[in-house]
Amino acid sequence: MLHIKLTMEAGSAGTLGLDVLRSPGDEERTRLFYDTAAKELGVDRTRSGNVSSTVPDLGIQKGQLALVDGKLSLDVFVDRSIIEAYANTHRSITTRAYPSRTDSLGLQLFGEGSTVTSLSVWKMGGMAV
């Protein structure tokens, strides 16, 4: 369970963002991305595993988002199977992912030509009941 705060300058990148629940060899991942040409924020679950889901490939969902001064700011919460991302305080994406691999725990930034201006990651504990 993680809380990730990330700000990236798009620069010359065509696509930039963050992979969560990523396996070491990139066989599985859930990708939060920004497409600079289309000006869209999206989530790509085509490699999320989803073995617990009745729908094996839930694909790509995306929507319009304007960058602020050329920057993408993400506030992401990963809590077991739920991923919530808040972008530039104007848009949000909530999705589920069910990795089939026990080693799908990694994070990776991507976006050749972009610049990370800030990154913080906190490990969260479970709720006490």
Image: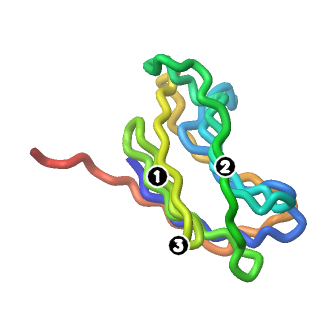
Residue 40 spot, x, y in % from top left: 73, 58
State left or right for residue 127 relative to residue 100: left
The secondary structure type at the circle numbered 3 is: loop
The secondary structure type at the circle numbered 1 is: strand
Residue 14, image quadrant? bottom right
Q: Three-letter amino acid code at disc 2?
A: Lys
Marks 3/1 in contact by CB < 8 Å: the verdict is no
State left or right for residue 47 relative to residue 106: right
Q: In percent of the image, x 52 and y 52: which residue is there?
A: 93
Q: CA distance from mark 3 to mark 1?
A: 13 Å
Label placed on residue 62:
2
Residue 3 spot, x, y in % from top left: 43, 58
Q: Residue furthest bottom?
A: 69
Kindly report which numbered mark, 1 or 2, lies closer to the viewer in this rendering: 2
Sequence order check, earlier mark of 2 and 3: 2
What residue did someone put label 3 on? Answer: 89
Q: CA distance from mark 1 to mark 2?
A: 14 Å
What residue did someone put label 1 on? Answer: 84
Q: CA distance from mark 2 to mark 3?
A: 16 Å
Q: Three-letter amino acid code at disc 1?
A: Glu
Q: Three-letter amino acid code at disc 3?
A: Thr
Residue 95 spot, x, y in % from top left: 49, 42
Q: Residue furthest front?
A: 64
Q: Is residue 14 above or below residue 54?
A: below
Pick the residue in front: 97 or 59: 59
Sequence order check, earlier mark of 1 and 2: 2
Sequence order check, earlier mark of 3 and 1: 1
